[in-house]
Image (spheres, rainbow, N blue to C red):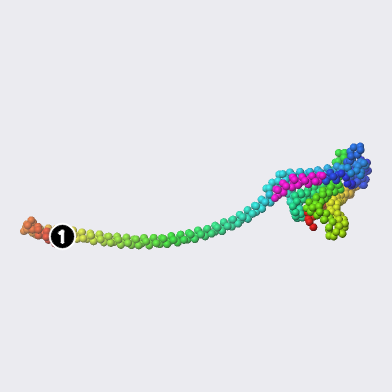
Amino acid sequence: MAATGEALTPQGYIQHHLTNLQVCVTDEGLALNSKLCEGNFWTWHIDSLFFSVGLGVLFLWLFRSVGKKATTGVPGKLQCFIEMVVEFVDSSVKETFHGRNPVIAPLALTIFVWVFMMNFMDMVPVDWIPSLAAAAGIPYMKVVPTTDLNITFSMALGVFVLIIYYSIKVKGISGFVKELTMQPFNHWAMIPVNFLLETVTLIAKPISLALRLFGNLYAGELIFILIALMYGANWALSTLGVTLQLGWLIFHIMVITLQAFIFMMLTIVYLSMAHEDH
Amino acid sequence: MNINATLLGQTVAFLLFVWFCMKFVWPPLMNAIEERQKRIADGLADADRAVKDLELAQAKATDQLKDAKATANEIIESANKRKAQIVDEAKAEADIERAKIIAQGQAEIEAERNRVKEDLRKQVATLAILGAEKILERSIDEAAHSDIVNKLVAEL
């Protein structure tokens, strides 16, 4: 499975699986995974973007087509399923967030389904898509978008922007500044301390969101890869590997659902906190 | 594992997807769900009302049945009363009629008897005259004695 220039060692195998397909613009034109891309901000992870945008479009297309055909009478099985998901998200939002905001529920739905679908790419056996890509001449292919820190961070950043936007919209700039500076210690002398504490709290929100999802999925993917290493050894280890792979897969179904749910739930909680006056 | 432009691309995609979901995915699904919830609630309310209506109708029917029975009993009773009355009246009328018929009969009998008596008297007179004629045939001139005989007849 090693790409050009990498020896077929366990380290090489793992390294190959954890490398994104990178494209950056250099002086000599487009460069694929070249040394020139390192440290260059304008590098694009084509595989992460392809799978995440593809899955997002799939999600929106599926829900949109069901929504357009939705009957108010007896729903079909697909419509039932979609409505169950929507109802689940809607009730989660209503339990936590009591204000009126037309953005939060669709946002939560998008996050939940999209993150779940991206996580679900972890269920595809680790070598399938990279092998296909290699056969098609693509040297690197990282299938699970949520194992890319860029992907998780960008969603967390989107949520962060919304947190700040609604904090200012609901409480005004003065209210938001007051929230950052006048608590937990309501005294003018404590303003620097308060500001430090509250800023850390604020910044910690997107970072914890992004790192939690990334960490769980990255670790899960790594374990899949490590178990996959056993396949080549001998029949006993291969059998053990298949068993372990299956066990981890079943366990991982819970992890990916849970992580998608946690990301959605924390988004709702953070946004409802942004709507609350203290 | 470095942060790079992918972050920006994904952020744009994320915001676009959320916007699209908010505009085109969430409303139709939510509308369908809410519409159905409303219809189910209406259906349940209708069912409840129907049950209540049924109970009312049954109570009404029972009442009407009771009323009908009472009316029927009344009608039968009054009919019985009327029957007795009619029978009594008929009896009384019949009695009167009978008395009348009897009285009439007796009157007729009386008249007949008077007539017969008259006839008999006339016949007796005739017979008497005949007898007298037979007796007096040889001695009495009919013309000379008819006035006496007439006197006799008138006296009878």
Q: x, y (%) of residue A164?
A: 81, 51
Along the horizontal axis of the image, is A89 left or right of B98? right
Quick check: can you spot residue A24? Answer: yes
Viewer-proximal residue, A56 or A107? Answer: A107
Q: x, y (%) of residue A55?
A: 80, 44
Residue at the extreme left: B139
Quick check: can you spot residue A227? Answer: no
Label 1 chain ID: B
Residue appearing at x 80%, y 47% in the figure: A114
Residue appearing at x 78%, y 53% in the figure: A170
Quadrant where the C terminus of chain A is found in the figure: bottom right
10 Å neighbourhood of mark 1: few (<14), some, or many (≥20)? some
Viewer-proximal residue, A42 or B100? Answer: A42
Q: Could you tell me the amino acid type at mark 1? A: Val
For the magenta stretch, what is the residue range? B12-34
Quadrant for residue B98, please give it: bottom left
- Report the number of numbered marks: 1
Q: Which residue is mark 1?
A: B124
Q: Is residue A239 magenta?
A: no
Q: x, y (%) of residue A264?
A: 80, 51
Along the horizontal axis of the image, is A82 left or right of B87? right
Residue appearing at x 79%, y 43% in the figure: A57
Q: x, y (%) of residue B96?
A: 32, 62
Quadrant for residue B52, please give it: bottom right
Quadrant where the N terminus of chain A is found in the figure: top right
Q: Is residue B25 magenta?
A: yes
Element type at marker 1? helix
Along the horizontal axis of the image, is A9 left or right of B107? right
What secondary structure prevails in the magenta region? helix
Viewer-proximal residue, B149 or B126? Answer: B149
Residue at the extreme top: A28
